[in-house]
Amino acid sequence: MALSLDLKQSIWQVVASIPEGRIATYGQVASMAGQPGRARWVGRLLSELPEATTLPWHRVVNASGQITNPHAMTQMRRLALEGIKINNLRISLKQHQWQP
DNA sequence: CCTATGACCATAG
DNA sequence: CCTATGGCCATAG
């Protein structure tokens, strides 16, 4: 399926709606955007965000609750500011996962 | 068309 | 907890 701006926006909108202090997984974001199975795509889309974006991309982690991206330092700092505990790049999904 | 590459995921051992 | 495996899917070459 080709990538339309609409599809991108649906992903961005879900990411933007993740509450402060909560996290979501790549797969979760994809599903909530009506695009199940496109977790990898979510990751790639976030990787293309401009550095000055206001989108809370730091609230997205993988299915294991692990931080797996090139900006781990920034991500950890931001999450810490929101009161999220991090152990060895790992976050407890049980405690912090966003569950609408 | 084919292969390679990811900010991924589920399952099995 | 860890590794291995197969699947996933848009992009790039």
Image (spheres, coloured by chain):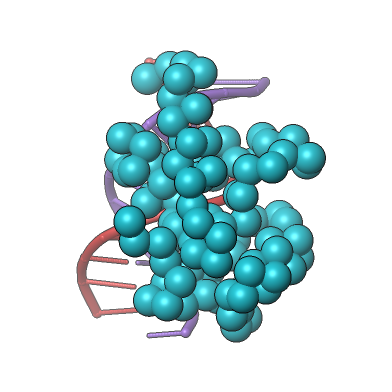
Chain colours: A cyan, B red, C purple
In depth, the one of A22 and B2 nearer the eye is: A22
Compared across the picture, whether A77 is left or right of A95 comes to right
Residue A6 against residue A62 in the figure, above or below: above
In depth, the one of C13 and A90 nearer the eye is: A90
Compared across the picture, whether A42 is left or right of A55 comes to left
Q: Position of residue A86 (x, y in %)?
A: 60, 79
* Identity of the residue drawn at 31% across and 35% down: A34
Image label count: 0
* Identity of the residue drawn at 48% across and 36% down: A13
Instruction: Work out whether residue A37 can be spotted.
Output: no
The quarter in which the C terminus of chain A is drawn is bottom left
The quarter in which the N terminus of chain A is drawn is top left
Compared across the picture, whether A1 is left or right of A74 comes to left
In depth, the one of C6 and A84 nearer the eye is: A84
* Identity of the residue drawn at 53% across and 43% down: A16
Q: Position of residue A17 (x, y in %)?
A: 48, 46
* Identity of the residue drawn at 50% across and 27% down: A8
Q: Residue furthest right?
A: A52
Residue A36 against residue A96 in the figure, above or below: above
Q: Quadrant of residue A10?
A: top left
Q: Quadrant of residue A67?
A: bottom right
Q: Position of residue A25 (x, y in %)?
A: 44, 57
Instruction: Work out whether residue A6 can be spotted.
Output: yes
Q: Position of residue A6 (x, y in %)?
A: 45, 20
